[in-house]
Amino acid sequence: MPDYIWRPIETLTEVERRIDLAAMRPLYENWRVSKKRLQQSSPAQLADFNQRLIRRLSVETGILERLYDLDRGTTEALVAHGFAEELVTRSNTNIEPTLLIDLLRDQEAAIQLVIDCIGKRRELTKGLIHELHAILTKHQETTTAVDQFGNRFEIPLLKGKYKEQPNNPKRPDGAMHEYCPPLHVDSEMANLLEWLSTYSEDDPIIVAAWLHHRFTQIHPYQDGNGRVARALTTMVLLRSDLLPLVLDRDLRVEYINVLESADLGELAPLANVFARLERNAILQALSVDADAEIARQRSLTSAVISSLADKFARRKEQKIAELRQVNDVARELRLQARQSLEQSFNEMEVTIADVGHTESFIHEGGSDHGNGHWYKFEVVSSAKETGKFANFSEDHYFVKASIRAARERLVFVTSFHHVGRELTGIMEATSFSRLESYEDSEDRESVDEKFFLCSMEPFVFTHRTKIAEIKDAFGRWLDQALAVAIKEYGDRL
């Protein structure tokens, strides 16, 4: 009995439309505004960032499909310098370097086709999808088929043509995942494209997740379906003026799991993974080092130029004031965090009272308290690790909570800081902790460990974010981060 039995694809349901991505939507608008500014102030840097993103996507999509393997060092060299064969040796990969470069260039060409289609406003059709598939599989001559008895054998790969044989994979436990039979592929693809054309007003991340999943349910080609699905996902996001998603090799297990959840009717996990990757891409793009100013040709008289300068200066001041409204959101989240931590730490005092005398303290700080520079090292270091720039030239806020029982103390900090080298109106919250031990003699403090990060992902918000829309999501995020810290602390007691 198949583990998953094929059934016709479904439209985007009302439940799926209500997937909670409220925290992302203000970020879309901030990115679109910031992108226009970056296109003026640092077009070369933005273009280079986009090109690197496309090359990284091209490398990782083939690794996900297990077309090849490639070590991390060579991956970074290829992303930085382009797909040159001299950057690859036979020891870096499990296939011939020449074939590897051909496959990478095919994947890069497919993304370039997507970009060209968006620029020319070319409609997404079956023919265009066939074209994408033909490009992606240009240097792949065969694929593996499985007959009714489970025997595996190589067959020629049809390029730019729908499958003619079933392509149902067998799981390690022997169960089968059944995809759309070849007979129904054409009609299923027609439904997919017809429904997609009506979703222009829906959240692009949700639409991208829906399209990606429904396409993989159909699995219209004998091979290369994952590569085509990710190219189509890129098309949806770029048409909404967002960034391509890079599904890294390390996400392969999570990626498969959320796709299987979607097979069972739960699209939210896949949409949340896409939202996380899009958020990270945007924050990294905003952290690009822009060292070029807008070059202006001045042919007007000095009086007119002076008048325009005053006008633009007033507009800039208004825009800066608008973007800095994100500080109001940060302060409200700081208050929410303080109240939540007070409750949690009071409960902890009661719970661990048997260990000995306990005491807890909650402090809030930041630029409005004269200590906005606190925890700069921890915040900047964690941002660098993910390719982002923590901007401490703007206001910074934090809440510090600590509890001591006997010789052991936990310090838990939630920080709210700006992201991007320019003022973007975007901030993120991160949480980190430190465990401290006190010596018996003279009660001297001995710090055993540095701060460690408790939040797996930052909590992102913008000047357009409404507190009512993210209050619950922030509470869940903070609870998860605090749980990490308490677990480490509990192990020490």
Image (spheres, rainbow, N blue to C red):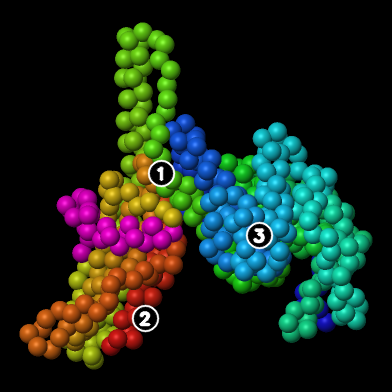
Gap between marks 3 and 1, in whole Å?
Answer: 27 Å
Q: Position of residue 74 (x, y in %)?
A: 56, 61
Which mark sits nearer the N-terminus, 2 or 1? Answer: 1
Task: Identify the element where label 3 is drawn.
Answer: helix
Query: What type is the residue that disc 2 sits on?
Result: Lys
Nearer the observer, 478 or 33? 33
Left or right, 314 with respect to 471, comes to left
The residue labelled by disc 1 is 289
Residue at point 42% right, 21% down?
Answer: 296
Residue at point 39% right, 47% down?
Answer: 420
The residue labelled by disc 3 is 61
Q: Which mark is residue 487?
A: 2
What are the residue bounds of the magenta stretch? 363-386
Gap between marks 2 and 1, in whole Å?
Answer: 38 Å
Residue at point 71% right, 39% down?
Answer: 117
Nearer the observer, 276 or 343? 276
